[in-house]
Image (cartoon, rainbow, N blue to C red):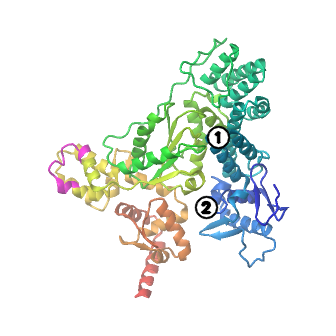
Amino acid sequence: MPTTGESLHVQLLGPVRAWRHDREVALGPPKQRAVFALLASRAGDVVSVEHIIDAVWGGNIPQTAANGVHTYVAGLRRVLEPERSRRESGDLLVSAAGGYVLQTDPGAVDATLFELRHTRARQARAAGNLPEALRTAESALSLWHGEAHAGVPGPFAAMERTRLQDLRLTAVEEWAADMLAADRPVEAVTVLLGAVAEEPLREKLRWLLMTALYRCGRQAHALDVYAQTRRLLRQELGIDPGAELRTLHQQILAGRPIGPAREPARPADPAPPAPAAGLVLPETPRPAQLPPVPRGFVGRSRELAQLRRLLSDGRQGASTPVAVVDGPAGVGKTAFTLELAHQLSEHFPDGQLYVDLQGTSMQGRSLSASDALLQVLRSLGVESSRVPADLAGRAALYRSLLHGKRMLVMLDDVLSADQLRPLIPGPTCCLLSTGRQRLGGLAVRDGAHLLRLPPLGTQDALWLLRCLSGDRLRHQEAVARRLVGLSRGLPLQLRIMAETLAANRDVPLSSLVEHFATEHGRMDRLGLGGDGSISLHTLFETAYQALPEEAARTFRLLGLFGDGPVTVSAAADLTGLDEPDVVGRLELLADHHFLVRVGAGAYRLHELMRLYAAECAEREPLTDRSAAVARVLRGVASIA
């Protein structure tokens, strides 16, 4: 796509290429092109080094990954601006805020331009301007030159290939429907034949192809497409064609005229499928997998209303509404999201899917996206032997099965964006998710709504404590308030306290309160069950184990700190790091809810996390702890 002008022009819809000053740029080895493709996809936005590493290496990150990123960026700078001296910063690929920015017009990137033109085609169609919609859609589709991000490695490229391919086929479907509305079925047939060959399980493409063939006078060919479709669906998925295809088949058999409808019509009384020879598997029941909301759910009305409004506004166009709820351990993310899911379920009549990804489970490794898709596909009626072996194949089949359906998907305990992205369904569905850390990349790249769930307010916490503890706290306002203060508003701790009160009715309240208030050993007492599976200590430990080693060491050393605010300079003294390095680790700990930001360059450990940090500090060698304390004392003395 060479053009004149000074700016950079990028091709992502095919082999990754770039042109500048009318000349193609040699982008270098595959991983360097992967870095370039990511930056081009986010043209004008800062992409952090951590995000680049995840996008290029995924879960198999070498120790040299950060150096590799810097090497690839240096290589790109040399080829993008060969006239730049090594001492000059350059104008195209610049460093900013812990990452890099490709400074070019997003409209000069073909993938971005394709999405803009696709949106404009939809707007023209909605306004009733069919010729303009067709022209704009054709100009959007003309930008494709093969498989998107072709030849580029890494999970980001793999998922972009799947996402953009799905969006392209949606654009083809809409263009073909407009062609039928314009009474131009002959021209639509050729394009639809190619699209069906690429995505044979996509029933809407086959509906459009059958309609176009029939309106061209090719009734036998249209019926043959239906026969092929029925054989394929039975062989691959063990199911029959959907109601729309069955109805169209009956109309073609009866020789009825089929008008230029833009969507497959949903009849009020769909014709039953024709009897077939051999075994026909029963239809998969509508999934209803949401667990119940825990007893005593209280409050959160503002947050629930906020997400209901955002998800309602987001269910338009080609974007899938996605919401991710994060927050510290024990804050009630799962209960809140289940409550939201049940409130929204009536808007998704085709069912609800639920998967626990076990991102912070102590029972073993978390569920990969591929394993989660296997679980979902089985629940949708796909035999295990017919599930594709690769992640991209499973994601494509999953989206094909949910295409056109209104289904709600909830993913609990997500560890990373890479776990979640392959399970984002099509735009008629909705995805809700929970996780410990804030997945900012999902908001930037996928338009996800992020909500950080705070602890309960005092009144809601008091109601929950009283509701679950029976009558133990009747007329005991001071005791109840003290327990709420000790809980820091965390619903899990409130539930543990309430269960302890209810189960120990013969123990005086004053003794139970002191049991919870005594600092020594408090983390061990905040649990239920002999296996310790329901405890704040377990939740904190799983989150700690997921930290990178550098951040984990910083957290251990923070356990030597008091209960006051942690400044950047104090943390630098404590760890022996330079301030720029320690800021990155403190920010990571804050994103994972180990620290709370209390101001510019200041953080705080809430009381329960401080107790846990003090416990973790014991894992640091005594000599290292002594050296850390000595550095802090020297820092205090120098200020004095």
In this orientation, which residue lies closer to the viewer: 362 or 38?
A: 38
First reached walking from the N terminus: tag 1 or tag 2: 2
Count every numbered label the image shows and give the total.
2
Residue shown at 68% from the left, 63% from the top: 64
Single out the residue that lies furthest toward the right: 23
Residue at mark 2: 50
Q: Is residue 307 left or right of residue 148?
A: left
Residue shown at 49% from the left, 31% from the top: 349
Quarter of the image for the C terminus: give it: bottom left
Q: Is residue 165 left or right of residue 555?
A: right
Residue 541 placement: quadrant: bottom left
Instruction: Look at the image and say whether residue 473 sits in the magenta stretch.
Output: yes
In this orientation, which residue lies closer to the viewer: 513 or 12?
A: 12
In this orientation, which residue lies closer to the viewer: 609 or 161?
A: 161
- Image coordinates for residue 466, horizontal then vertical, percent: 23, 47
Is residue 157 visible in the rendered structure shown here? Answer: yes
- Image coordinates for residue 229, horizontal then vertical, percent: 70, 23
Question: Which label was assigned to residue 125?
Answer: 1
Question: Which label was assigned to residue 161?
Answer: none
Amino acid tagged 1: Arg
Question: Between tags 1 and 2, which lies in front?
Answer: 1
Q: Is residue 440 left or right of residue 93?
A: left
Q: Secondary structure at mark 1?
A: helix
Given contact means CB atoms under 8 Å apart, are the residues at marks 1 and 2 in contact?
no
In this orientation, which residue lies closer to the viewer: 127 or 154?
A: 127
How far apart are the alpha carbons under marks 1 and 2? 41 Å
Amino acid tagged 2: Glu
Q: Secondary structure at mark 2?
A: helix
Q: What range is drawn magenta here?
A: 466-480
Quarter of the image for the N terminus: give it: bottom right
